[in-house]
Image (cartoon, rainbow, N blue to C red):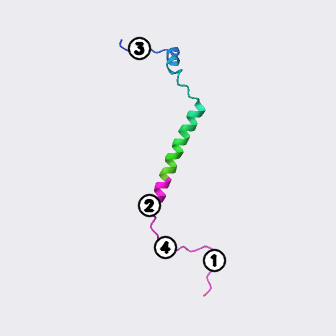
Amino acid sequence: MGHKEVTLAQHNDRTAGYPMPSLFRFLVIVGLLSAVAFGGIYAMATYFEPEPKEVSKAVPGVKIRK
């Protein structure tokens, strides 16, 4: 009873003053996601150092002469 129905024409009338092309919206979203990803990678590279450890592994097919 207290709900007001909004038709498509009324919705378009309210948003007519603020047009935003879908390509521009897409580029803004992709830019923001890229900035968040770049910021995360930069923070990981700057603040976290890997632990150095030795790795010894036999190489198949290589014989060492003594």
Q: Amino acid at mark 1?
A: Val
Q: Quadrant of residue 16?
A: top right
Between the C-alphas of marks 4 and 1, the distance is: 20 Å
Q: Secondary structure at mark 2?
A: loop
Q: Residue at x 43, y 59 (%)?
A: 47
Q: How crowded is the residue under tag 2: few (<14 C-alpha within 10 Å), some, or many (20+)?
A: few
* Number of marks present in the image shown: 4
Task: State which mark lies toward you, 4 or 2.
Answer: 2
Task: State which mark lies toward you, 3 or 1.
Answer: 3
Q: Which residues are magenta?
A: 41-65
Between the C-alphas of marks 3 and 4, the distance is: 69 Å
Give percent across and percent down for residue 22: 58, 30
Pointer 2 residue: 48
Q: Amino acid at mark 3?
A: Lys
Residue 66 drawn above or below residue 18: below
Q: Which mark is residue 4?
A: 3
Between the C-alphas of marks 3 and 1, the distance is: 80 Å
* Marks 3 and 1 in Cβ contact (< 8 Å): no
Verify whether residue 62 appears in magenta. yes
* Marks 4 and 2 in Cβ contact (< 8 Å): no
Q: Amino acid at mark 4?
A: Glu
Pointer 1 residue: 62
Give percent across and percent down for residue 2: 35, 13
